[in-house]
């Protein structure tokens, strides 16, 4: 009996769908079920899916009668999964041939890990490799720490243990505009660790959206609001108690494309992250060491980003002030300056 279900939601993905399906059917690991749910596509996706169903008995097709959204479809996939493991796949991406074999073996050898993924290599609409490689972190404890502030799990590369999802009634929240996976994995991490393997598991397709500037701006504002709510969820789960000023600067900087605008905001961020590091110790959080490391490194990253962005906007004295701040941070990270 198969122990793995590969689950792929589909919506108007006809242009790339064959390549995505083929990459799963051609896996070196053969014993799996392939659950595909079409979410009311109006292109040729359904026709392509029907063709594949007749070719391979591992494929199970389900159809939403109308477009109900990605969260609804992902939750339906969780409900229909009857195996011990579920591997997530997106309909415009490509899985590398060894993905399932590598991940199943990893989970068998690491029973304390609840899920595992790997790197996602960016590709363009024609399948050409781009420079992007995501995520940056491999260590499970460090992944868990960084997920407090930013998503560092490549959804289309992940395989999860279903008992964790079933036993804790974990599901995707509605209206999360393409970041429903971030909130989902934050909830999963309350019950165990997720690892990343040092190997590309997924080729992640960057597709132009064609949105108008107005619609794009509105959608970004909504996504920022959702990321803020995920941060609030994480703060509550770990017991962090921030002042409004601390909370506001953390949210601002760790939204999509977030950054500090001036040295005052950079100072505010330093004290907010220092507060998080101190509270992690006081609350005796199991990953307190990793949270403190994460806070120092995230601040160092923001200093570097700030200096790069501000370089052409600052006068001579301001540039020297930022350079001094950057030098102090580097010394702190190296342990040569006491906290």
Image (cartoon, rainbow, N blue to C red):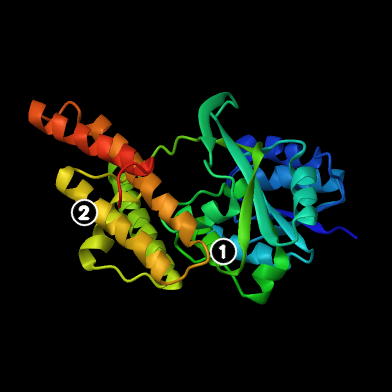
Q: Secondary structure at mark 2?
A: helix
**In this picture, residue 164 sits left or right of residue 266:** right
Residue 210 shows in the view: yes
Q: Residues within 10 Å of mark 1 (few under 14, many from 20)?
A: some
Q: Nearer the viewer, residue 125 or 289?
A: 289
Query: On the image, numbered disc 2 is attached to which residue?
Result: 268
Q: Residue at coordinates 80% horizontally, 40% vertically from top-left?
A: 27
Q: Position of residue 228 (x, y in %)?
A: 35, 61
Report the disc number at residue 189. Answer: 1
| Circle nearer the N terminus (2, 1) | 1
Q: Residue at coordinates 34% horizontally, 49% vertically from top-left?
A: 220
Image quarter (top left, top right, bottom left or bottom right) of the N terminus: bottom right
Outermost residue, right side? 1
**In this picture, residue 28 sits left or right of residue 47:** right
Q: Nearer the viewer, residue 162 or 305?
A: 305
Q: Vertical placement of 66 versus 308: above or below? A: below
Residue 30: image quadrant is top right
Q: Position of residue 265 (x, y in %)?
A: 19, 49
Q: Are marks 2 and 1 in contact (CB under 8 Å)?
A: no
Q: Vertical placement of 321 versus 70: above or below? A: above
Residue 177: image quadrant is bottom left
Q: Secondary structure at mark 1?
A: helix
């Amino acid at each position: 009996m198969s122990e793995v279900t590969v689950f792929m939601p589909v919506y108007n993905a006809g242009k790339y769908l064959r390549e995505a399906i083929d990459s799963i059917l051609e896996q070196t690991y053969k014993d799996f079920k392939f659950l595909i749910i079409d979410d009311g596509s109006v292109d040729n996706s359904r026709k392509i899916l029907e063709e594949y169903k007749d070719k391979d008995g591992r494929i199970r097709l389900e159809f939403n009668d109308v477009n109900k959204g990605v969260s609804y479809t992902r939750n339906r996939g969780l409900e229909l999964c009857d195996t011990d493991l579920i591997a997530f796949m997106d309909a415009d991406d490509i899985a590398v041939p060894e993905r399932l074999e590598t991940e199943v073996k990893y989970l068998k050898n690491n029973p304390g890990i609840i899920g595992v993924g790997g790197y996602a290599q960016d590709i363009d609409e024609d399948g050409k490799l781009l420079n992007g490689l995501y995520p940056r972190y491999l260590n499970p404890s460090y992944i868990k720490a960084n997920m407090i502030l930013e998503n560092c799990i490549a959804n289309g590369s992940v395989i999860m243990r279903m008992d964790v999802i079933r036993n804790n009634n974990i599901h995707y929240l509605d209206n999360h505009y393409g970041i429903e996976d971030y909130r989902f994995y934050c909830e999963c991490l309350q019950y165990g660790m997720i690892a990343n393997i040092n190997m590309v598991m997924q080729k992640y397709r960057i597709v132009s959206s064609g949105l108008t500037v107005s619609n794009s701006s509105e959608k970004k504002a909504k996504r920022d609001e959702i990321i803020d709510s995920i941060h609030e969820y994480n703060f509550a789960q770990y017991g962090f108690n921030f002042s409004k000023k601390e909370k506001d600067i953390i949210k601002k900087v760790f939204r999509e494309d977030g950054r500090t605008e001036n040295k005052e905001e950079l100072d505010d961020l330093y004290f907010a992250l220092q507060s998080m590091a101190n509270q992690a110790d006081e609350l005796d959080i199991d990953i307190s060491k990793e949270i403190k490391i994460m806070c120092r490194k995230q601040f160092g990253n923001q200093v570097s980003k700030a200096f790069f962005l501000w370089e052409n906007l600052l006068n001579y004295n301001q540039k020297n002030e930022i350079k001094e701040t950057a030098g102090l941070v580097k010394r702190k990270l190296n342990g040569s300056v006491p906290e």
